[in-house]
Each structure stands twice: as C-alpha cells, then as structure tokens.
Image (cartoon, rainbow, N blue to C red):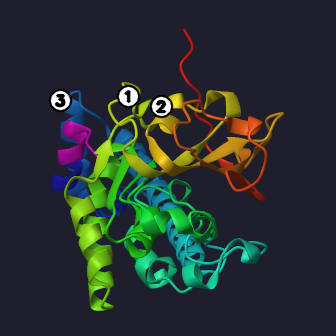
Amino acid sequence: SVIIQWFVQRRGNIDQDSAVMSLELCEAGDGIAGKTASEAHSNNVCDHDRVRAFLQEQIKKIEANKLEANNTDAHDTNANETEKDFYNSKDNTFFYDVMGWETTTVSKVDKLLAVTPSLREAFVPVCDWEEVGAVSLHKAVATKMLDTLRRAKRIIDLGCGTGALLAIFAELAPRAKLEGIEGMEQLVEAAPRRLVRAAEIFERAGKQEAGKAMRVAAVDGIAHGDAFGFNADGSCNGLYNVVTVGFAMINEDVPIAFWNALADGGQLCVAICDEPLQVAYEKYQARIHFFTKKKGEGKFPGFRAPLGRRHEKIDIPVHFELVRPMRQ
C-alpha cells in the first residue's frame, strides 16, 4: 500500500517487482490497498481502477525496455564478435598481404619488422579501419622508394595517421628525421603513444636506431594541420628527400608546393586518380605514382613525364579519399 501511495502521488516510474506486487494487491482486493486507493481518490489523485491501469502500463513499459535492452546487447555482442573476427582474419589488409601485390615488393622489405602484425599492432586504428593503409600498399611504396630512402635525411608523410608508414621508413632510414602532418586531431593525439610503442618493439628486437627514430618522431614529429596546404608559403623548399601523400588527388591539382619541398634527387609519392573519375567503396580509384626531382627542376612534371626512372607507378588500382583545393 505504501508503494501504491508513493507512485500514485508522484506518478513516477517504479521497478517491475514493485509494480507486480502492487498490482497483485489491487487484483486481490487487499483491504489496505483498497484503503490507500480510496484515500488517493478522496484527495483527487487517482482511483482504484486507475491504480490498476497505471501498474499494468508500468509493467508493459518495463518489459518492453528489457526486450529492447536484450536486443541491443545481442546486437553489440554480434558487432563485437564481427569486429574481433575481422581483426584476426586474413581479410584485415592492415596486417596481412593482399593477393595480387606479390610482385610489388622485394625480400628486403618483406623481412622488415615494421611490416609484421606484431609491430603493426602498435598502429591499430583510433576510430575505424578506413584511417589506416594496407600493409601491401605500404610495402610497395617502400620498395619503389628504397634507393631514395637509403640516403634520405628528412622524410615527411602527409596524411600520416598515427605513423604506420613512418615506422617502415624508420627501419629503412633510421638516421633520417621523420615527420608527418595529419588532419584528424584524434590521430595526432594518439600518435606519440603509438610511436613509442613501436620504438619499444624495435628496441626489444635489437633495432636501436629505428627505435630512436620513432622516439624522436613521438616528441614533435607529428603535427596537426591541413596536409594539402603543406609548404604553401615555401618555407620548406628543398628540405625533404621523401614526400609521401596519404590521400588522392587529380593530376592537375597536385600542389607545386609539394614538389618544391623536395631536394634535388628527392622523390614524391602520390595517389593520382584515374580519369574519368571512378568511385568504389565510397572512395576514388587511383594509382600510386612516384616522381623523382632532377637538379634545378622547378615545375612539377605530372603525367607529362613519361614512365621510366623519373616517373614510376604501381599499376594496381587503389581507393583513397579525394582531396581538392578550395576554388575561389
């Protein structure tokens, strides 16, 4: 009766056990329950039938909420299981090679610690798998740039995420200064921890120089900013031996600032969209191109440069986010 009086006066929610117990009192015509309902009625709050109706309504709501919660829990469990299955499966291209890319790499790159799942684990996504590149793609990029990386003193990755590609560069060019620019603030915040974790794995494997390169990059190597606007003011002209770009562009949109940032003999790696534009998986189809800068070359050659030593490409389609300049 106390329970009935409480919720009748306040019209609040009650738990299922209390509602069922109170309803049983009403249905049994319990004298105390009837008295309470009568008193409530005399105070213009509610009558016995309305108490019963309210209790029944409460029980239905509680049961419906429980059913919805159970369904949500089941959905979350299934989603977690699906995520777990993908994480560990060979379909997870961040960890495992993609069929058809075997010819794009060499044994020196295949044997790197930085391309193994044990080290890639340090760079698992912060938000979703779309933010990280496939290990086959990273290995192919490293293979094409192998000679340049061996002598590189300064490297920058535009759209670097938390630094998975930089870890490969650290192992191949441990004495180079490694830098990155990333537009997603969450990834920039997570990057130092990921880089330190990778450093620890390198160091345990006896790769002290690679570990040191990672630790230096963790301090101030990753900057938050608009990667497309890199070197727009020309302040970095001629400073870099390697510039890699983690998003796709149209050939005519490649900023001259990227090219100007290269030192003589430096190499630019960029995904250039196939034309006419083709969309798949909500991304734009592109090919990875590599341009090597001749001494004193001021103008970006783009597709005008024939394929050869100074202009190479990986002729396998990839899918990237397309970034275009703001038009006035």
Secondary structure at badge 1 equals loop
Q: Which residue is mark 2?
A: 257
Q: Any magenta on residue 11? A: yes
Q: Is 319 left or right of 221, judged from the image as shown?
A: right
Q: Around disc 2, counting alpha carbons within 10 Å, would you say few (fewer than 14), some (14 to 19), or many (20 or more)?
A: many
Pick whichever, 301 or 54, lies toward us: 301
Q: Any magenta on residue 266? A: no
Pick whichever, 167 or 27, lies toward us: 167
Q: Is residue 14 visible?
A: no
Region rendered in magenta = 6-13
User: In the rendered image of this protein, does residue 287 appear above or below residue 90?
Assistant: above
User: In the rendered image of this protein, does residue 67 appear above or below residue 172?
Assistant: above
Q: Which residue is mark 1?
A: 234
Secondary structure at badge 3 equals loop
Q: Which residue is mark 3?
A: 43
Q: Residue 211: x percent and y percent?
A: 28, 76
